[in-house]
Amino acid sequence: MIVTPFGDLDYKSKPMSLQWLAAHGTRHETLRKALSRNGISLSPAPLFSQVSLEWVRLHYLHHMGLLRLIIPDRSISSQALSADPMGSEAQFQNWHRMHNLLHTRLDQALQVH
């Protein structure tokens, strides 16, 4: 199990994944609104009913846009987010660790709680 700001996850647990996707989508909308208050426009994050390779690809592109706007010093690389998080349990764990770190930095930068 991995603990995320959007809920706990077990590798390949569909109920946990659905709950995580909903909470994570809400966080991205919160980030988008925080950017908007600062005069920065960003399209909504891709929301799907399940994590798929297409979702990973679109989510990665969305995070790259957030990184360029919020963390331009490249102190965090989202390269791990382009990998398939469902390829193996190790990839799943690594993807979520990097994703959690990235969201923590974004929340701090935008003062989102």
Image: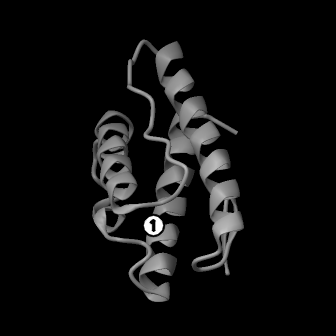
Instruction: Say how many tags the image has.
Output: 1
Q: Amino acid under label 1?
A: Met
Task: Report x, y in % for residue 106.
Answer: 50, 44
Q: Secondary structure at mark 1?
A: helix
| Quarter of the image where one finds residue 30 | top right
**Residue tagged 1:** 98
Q: Residue at x 42, y 81 (%)?
A: 91
Q: Is residue 47 visible to the viewer in this orientation of the structure?
A: yes
Q: Relative to residue 104, is residue 97 depicted above or below?
A: below
Image quadrant containing the C terminus:
top right
**52 displayed left or right of 112:** left
**Circle 1 Cα neighbour tier, 10 Å, few/some/many (<14 / 14–19 / ≥20):** some
Q: Is residue 75 visible to the viewer in this orientation of the structure?
A: no
**8 displayed left or right of 105:** right
Frontmost residue, 54 versus 8:
54
Task: Report x, y in % for residue 12.
Answer: 58, 77
Q: Residue at x 34, y 62 (%)?
A: 53
Q: What colour scheme does the image use?
A: one colour
Frontmost residue, 82 versus 112:
82
**23 displayed left or right of 29:** right
Image quadrant containing the N terminus:
bottom right
Q: Residue at x 65, y 46 (%)?
A: 22
| Quarter of the image where one finds residue 86 | bottom left
Task: Report x, y in % for residue 103.
Answer: 52, 51
**22 displayed left or right of 34:** right
Task: Report x, y in % for residue 92.
Answer: 48, 77
